[in-house]
Every structure is written in C-alpha cells, then in structure tokens.
Image (cartoon, rainbow, N blue to C red):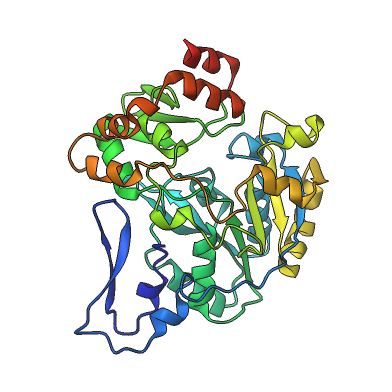
Amino acid sequence: CGCGACQSCCPVKAISLAEEQDGFSYPVVDEDLCIHCQKCVKVCPELNPRFENDSQPQCYAAYAPDEIRMESSSGGIFTLLAEDVFSRGGCVCGVALNEEFQVEHRIAETKEELARLRGSKYVQSRMGDIYQKVKKLLQEERLVLFTGVPCQVAALKGYLGREYENLLTADVICHGVPSPGLFRKYVREKYGKNKLASFQFRTKEFGHNCNHCIATLKNGKRMVGDLYNDPFEKAFHRSLMLREVCGDCKFAPMPRQGDLTLGDFWGIAKYNPDYADPKGVSLVLVNSGKGKAAWERIQDRMPFREPVPLDFARKHNRFRSKIRVDENRDAFFVYTGQMSFQKAVQKAFGEKFSLKTEAKRAAKKLLPQSVIEKLRK
C-alpha cells in the first residue's frame, strides 16, 4: 500500500522505496543486507491488519465556525481538533504540499504551521521518517494528533507496536490515492514546475464540492480546473490513476483505524435538508473512547453538531472495501509513458468519455448550475 512502515522499521536499512512506472513507490529489499528478522512483516498493515475500534461507532454531521470552514475542505473539524491539541502543548502530524509541490507528511507545532496541513490533497503522501519522529515525540510524553488515510494510521500503529495514551489518531474517508509520479507529470506539463506559485486541490468558490482545483502562477494568473477542462480532475473522479490496492481496501469498512474518522458528509441533504450547508459539512465517526474524549472537548466550539444514523452514512460515503476502478486503468499507466498526461487521459477514456455523461455526473455531485450548464453545452 506504500505506507513505508517496513522501510522505517528495518534495523539494518535493507528496505528502500522505489518509484515504478505507475508513479507509486514500492518496497525493495536488499538481500545482501537483510537479516531475516521479519520485523517488516510484523509491522506491515496489509500482512497483519488489526481491527480494535468500535464496529458500530457514533456518527455525526458537524461543522466549525465559518471563518474556519472557509479555509477547510469540508466542515473544519480537523482544525478544531488540532487547536485543542496545541492548547495542551501537543503537536499535529498531517499532510502538506511542499515547496516542490510534492505531498508529504509533516509535523506542525503552531497554528501558523497548521495552515499547510489543512485542505485535501488528492495524491498519496510521502511518509519519509515521520513514524520515527512521531515515536520520539510520544516517548518525550508530548501529545500527538496523527492524521492520514486509514492504511497510514494502521501503519503507524504497527510501527509503534504498543498503545500510547498521548497519541490521538484520525483517519480520513479515502476514495483511494492517486499517483504522486503522475501528479508531478501533470504539474510539469500543464503549468511548468518553475512557474507555479500555489495549487489547491479543492476550493469553495463554487460551493461545497470536490470538483474544482485552482492553480496560481507566479505571474498572478489563476487557472481553474474542473471536470470539464482538467485532465487530473477527470482521471481522479473516474478512478483512473489510483493505486491498485485501493480498489479493494481492507481498511475502508468498520471498524476504522483512527480514534476518529473525518470526511465530507456527502448526501446529507437527503437525510435532512436543514443539515446541508454550502460552506461544508463534516462526517465524523467516534471510533474509540479516546476519540470520544477528544470529540467532547471540542463540541462547545461547533455551531452545528447532530447525530446521524450510521447506516445512512454507509450508503453515501466510501465505507466498503471494493470500489469500481476504470477498466482502462492499466492501459492508462502504459499510455503515460508514451505521451502527455492529458493525451493519456483522453486515450484511456476513448469513446466512453462524453460531455453529456460528465454533465450527469456533475449534477449528481451538486455542482453549481452554471458549471452544469457549461458541461451540457
């Protein structure tokens, strides 16, 4: 799954991560260095999954104050948790887009550093030595909030090998992780690596949805991508460039890996129209006693917090192992080695891809009417 726990735990540094043609990294073992201690096997979340949390967690729709929500992808609950941890002398580990436009895990000690960890990044993150850093902080008796996709939370737990009372984990509802290598190719070809100033994988300029990205160039020009005009958006939403294991994920169902689960509450208007809000609504699962304590500490800062049946959340969000992966996925990764990213996307979709079909998909995702009309035309 590319979590990197095996590399981090190897006592003789016999394991490295190598990027393959699909742009994902996979472990490679140096047999000359390997001492066959089996530690990598023991910590691997795929080989030794552990399911210890509540299989019927409490489920909520909630959101933070508007000033936090407008800087967040969904309802801003992550920020409330992070600020509570900071107030108690702790630190937060999450995902950032670095200066080279690579997605990586890093640690924030202040509210100012937290800004880079907010917002969705639709690329598999690079873990580096983050597990070692988190363990050191825990051993120093620092409070740590660790966030990541479920397999990364499982990997951290496997690496640590024991429970730490000063560790709080939150997994995000994950559709699957796109390729880091292909994101680099997309950025280089569409914007030019040295011309890009910032990149947002999501924006609320068009309401609460995940169908628009915004690139800002160093000359000040803003380029908005959507399902109509951007190849990365098209490929991501059609599951064309996900890691293979994501198509059948053992960590997506309950019980979840984190003490809390955070995500967008897609479809909440179907349960109660009054719960929907264009600024974003979070889905929160309280999976453990530790998660419940953290949830209760921040509830006074939430202007909205209502319980929702777990079965409803299951129907409208990814809490199942298998998802549909585009049938041309494997061919697409071959194409990307032969042509531009945009041409590879177009060739992979072929005649299956049509603006009429995308208009229907967009309407289902509650895109602004102006965008829907643009697609229909």
Q: Is residue 117 left or right of residue 369?
A: left
Q: Position of residue 275 (x, y in %)?
A: 78, 35
Residue at x-position 54% and y-position 65%: 153
Q: Position of residue 200 (x, y in %)?
A: 45, 36
Residue at x-position 62% and y-position 71%: 51
Q: Is residue 55 above or below residue 6?
A: above
Res 301 seen here:
yes
Q: How many numbered discs, if any?
A: 0
Q: Position of residue 271 (x, y in %)?
A: 78, 37
Q: Is residue 179 above or below residue 344?
A: below
| Residue sitting nearer the eye, 348 or 86 | 348
Q: Is residue 117 left or right of residue 104?
A: right
- The image quadrant where one finds the N terminus is bottom left
Res 192 seen here:
no
Q: Is residue 361 above or below residue 63?
A: above
Residue at x-position 48% and y-position 47%: 116
Q: Is residue 35 above or below residue 196?
A: below
Q: Quadrant of residue 30?
A: bottom left
Q: Position of residue 331 (x, y in %)?
A: 28, 43
Residue at x-position 68% and y-position 69%: 53
